[in-house]
Image (spheres, rainbow, N blue to C red):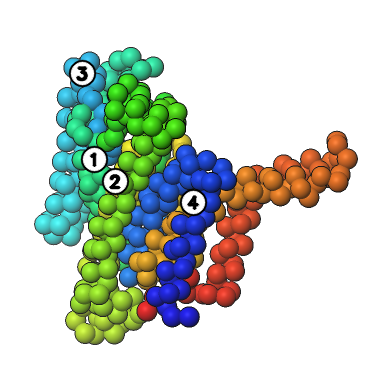
Amino acid sequence: MSEPLKNTLLFVLVAGLILLTGFVQSWSTALLILNMGLISAVMSLGVNLQWGYAGLFNVGVMGFVALGGLAAVLVAMPPTVDAWAAGGMRVMAGLIIGAAVIVAAAMTLRFLPRSRWRTLAVLVILVGGFFLYRGVFDPGVEAVEDVNPAGTGYLGGLGLPVLVAWPVGGLLAAGAAWIIGKAALGLRSDYLAIATLGIAEIILAILKNEDWLSRGVKNVSGIPRPVPYEVELQETAWFVEGAQRIGVDPVTASSLYIKVAYAGLFAVVLIILLGLAQLALNSPWGRMMRAIRDNETAAEAMGKNVTRRHLQVFVLGSAVVGMAGAMMTTLDGQLIPTAYQPLRFTFLIWVMVIVGGSGNNLGAVLGGFLVWFLWVQVEPIGHWLMQVVTAPLAEGSALKAHLLESAAHMRLFTMGLVLLLVLRFSPRGLIPEK
């Protein structure tokens, strides 16, 4: 079988599974799988840029996804006027002071000659700046969080269209990646993994605890949509007439219409990013990145700045992941910091890249759709399977109860099994790198 035919059949298989879900379960479930599959494919593309192109082992994917979600809040939510009046300017002044202290300490280290006086100057700047920062920042935070803490208790956003948040999410993640990369990309791959995982946890801890920024564990709900609301469609004459004409309840039709609209937006983003990634892969830049990945010493001998190129691709990949995080928060309509778990937003994305084929953009996209489909469908299928297996057992049987309870763990078992099978029979992925 030729390679193009095999790749086409793999995508047709995944499309068939999603269509089968629509016919057997519901079209709402099928479209939800499609939407999250599109977002997962974008995340997988971002990780593939880092690992497949440059061999960078980033296990802090969750942190960049969370930053993308935060961007949706900061851009799309309306500003909380009372909170800004109570302490918003003090919070901003405190952040500016904190940044100025860090810059001043860095400049002192860079321009003063090495001596005890330089060390003393840095300590004075950092300690004095810390107390100044806290003295300005803390009262502002308390004032902001005391403004209707049950309903708002945070500064809100800019009130811009939520679609603006998608590229802003990429920029926010790229900025964080640049800071992380400047500190961590000189480390060996295993230490880089530890550093990125730790920094991702720091980002998540900030989102959970800084109520003035993201409401913490109280969550931010009601993020504006880029598509109409179901109620608006149900009150529109042309939509109701069209739904009745095809024999579909307007409530059901409005839900499906919204999911299809989201799918169209996500598909446009995925197609654009996939096209750009393919152009980059086949360009001289892409060949250089793969050369650095395969042999850093030889690339350095040819005059390539390995650390600079690693930083470049690390920032690009993180930007793509951050954009996907903003898209996902837009789809959910809310930011839930406690929902960002490494199992889903790091391990699962890595499984997508490995199963699909690292170094191959089409493979990363295929892995995003296939693994997400399995992640959603395995648990109900596993529960049905356990019911069939335990049907002959008597009611009240301890073994039957144990097996039925174990169905909840079918997701993890299946992910591990799929990963092992792919690594055994197709170690380079379903669509391997050329």
N-term-proximal mark, 2 vs 1: 1
**What residue do we see at 24% from left, 21% from top?**
80
Residue placed furthest toward the left: 111
Sort mark 3 into few (<14), some (14-19) or many (20+) by Cα contacts within 10 Å. Answer: few
Residue placed furthest toward the front: 245
Q: Secondary structure at mark 1?
A: helix
Residue pointed to by mark 3: 81
Q: Nearer the viewer, residue 194 or 228?
A: 228
For the residues bearing labels 2 and 1, Cβ distance under 8 angstroms: yes
Residue 163's disc is: 1
The answer to whether 414 is drawn above or below residue 251 in the figure is below
Residue pointed to by mark 4: 19
Residues at marks 4 and 2, CA–CA distance in whole angstroms: 20 Å
The answer to whether 201 is drawn above or below residue 48 in the figure is above
Q: Position of residue 34 (x, y in %)?
A: 43, 49
Residue pointed to by mark 2: 265
Q: Position of residue 148 (x, y in %)?
A: 33, 14
Residue 247's quadrant in the figure?
top left
The residue type indicated by label 3 comes to Val
N-term-proximal mark, 1 vs 3: 3
Residues at marks 2 and 1, CA–CA distance in whole angstroms: 10 Å
Residues at marks 2 and 3, CA–CA distance in whole angstroms: 32 Å
The residue type indicated by label 1 comes to Leu
The answer to whether 324 is drawn above or below residue 45 in the figure is above
N-term-proximal mark, 2 vs 3: 3
The residue type indicated by label 4 comes to Leu
